[in-house]
Amino acid sequence: MEFCLSENENVLVPFQQSSHQQGEIVEVDQNNNQAFKNKASRLKLKQGEVLLLEDQQQEQKTFLVQDSLPGGNHYLYSAVCVDYPTQLLTLYIGAHPSRLEPCWEDMSLWYQVQRQTKVLNIFKHQGITSKYLPEMIASGRILHSGPCKKQTPGGRCDHPLCGTPILVTSPVGEPVSYVVSQDGPLSPEEAVRCCRDCLAALRSAAMANVQHGDICPENIIRVVDEQGSRNNIFYVPISWGRAVLEERDSPAINLQFSSSHALQHGKLCPSSDAESLVYLMLFICGETMQQQDSIESALQWRETSWAKRSIQQQLGEVSALLKAFADYVDSLCGTPYPVDYDIWLKRLSRAVDGVGDRGTSGGGS
Ligand SMILES: [Zn+2]
């Protein structure tokens, strides 16, 4: 069963996935029908385009689009706020409100923009800040130039940008999926750093009772910190729209990267994100993971790989520490026990920040 938005953006309603075949849409009024035909021309922003954002307090901010971010996520752009043009920001563009017809793609945009806004607001309100978590800079709806025929402040007209939800975050980086496709596997040092940074983000989120729920190479960005001298690269898990906040929330299902518990029950257990992080480590270290074509085969792969300890062996060739981490996660998988973030952050940080260390210290100590 898939879900989509009804008119009220806070209500999820089930729909048949097959219904996004154009011919099967019934009972759409003239306007919606027109919007549907426009769907192929999804919002594409151009370099140099100026976006005016209006937030919920009716305050306005102007952003200048720099580029679309690599990796094929068409809703992601880099931009600067014209008031602070030196800071590069990430822009998530949602679907035009009138185009919220039952369609999986638009649903995923809703997760990326509106729901992620909710999650980042939770971090903000609970005072959760971390270098390794995205920070919300602004959120709201797009105002457009020229005449606007909207009837109410929260309304919209049929201009392609009118009322489109938008989320602006910091920092900006390249998804590790893109990094690996361009440059090949990460070095052992970088892999350990990536693991440490992601785990630091997960720990911070856990303080607000938030689990990411969609750890995969597309959702981890590599950030180059211009100010830094030596350690000027770090990693940030982005796309918190699928985060699990409460019992009824279900995580994203990814045959390659979801935890066994998520695949089996559609829910996360406390170590699920850490388990996905282990699969992420295999990926960034260049281990070929068998392509999975069903939940059954994905579960079978996990069961066999953990039972034969082949995941630990593969990671062990890269780093004794990552191997030890995989062993630890294996002992927790599917249990109700929380991840001991502190002890692993301490071990990983010792390896990351140690001079000339190849990421192997602390593995057994
Ligand atoms: Zn308008």
Image: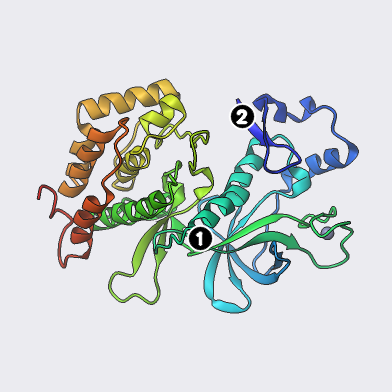
Q: Position of residue 168 (x, y in %)?
A: 58, 62
Q: Residues within 10 Å of mark 1 (few under 14, many from 20)?
A: some
Q: Could you say which disc has been placed on residue 2 in the image?
A: 2
Q: Quadrant of the N terminus?
A: top right
Q: Is residue 81 visible?
A: yes
Which of these two is toward me, 349 or 254?
Answer: 349
Q: Position of residue 347 (x, y in %)?
A: 19, 54
Which of these two is toward me, 58 or 134?
Answer: 58
273 above or below 239?
A: above
Tell me what residue is drawn at x 76 percent, y 40 percent: 7
Q: For residue 146, which quarter of the picture?
A: bottom right
| Chain-order first, disc 2 or disc 1 | 2
61 above or below 247?
A: below
Identify the residue under disc 1: 124
Q: For residue 295, which quarter of the picture?
A: top left
Q: Amino acid at mark 1?
A: Lys
Residue depth check, mark 2 versus mark 1: number of the one nearer the observer: 1
Q: Which element carries disc 2, helix, strand or loop? A: strand
Give the CA separation, mark 2 to mark 1: 30 Å
Ligand 1 shown in quarter: bottom right
Q: Is residue 319 visible?
A: no
Q: Could you say which disc has been placed on residue 312 in the image?
A: none
Q: Amino acid at mark 2?
A: Glu
Labels in figure, total: 2
Give the farthest residue toward the left. Answer: 365
185 above or below 296?
A: below
Q: Position of residue 37 (x, y in %)?
A: 80, 40
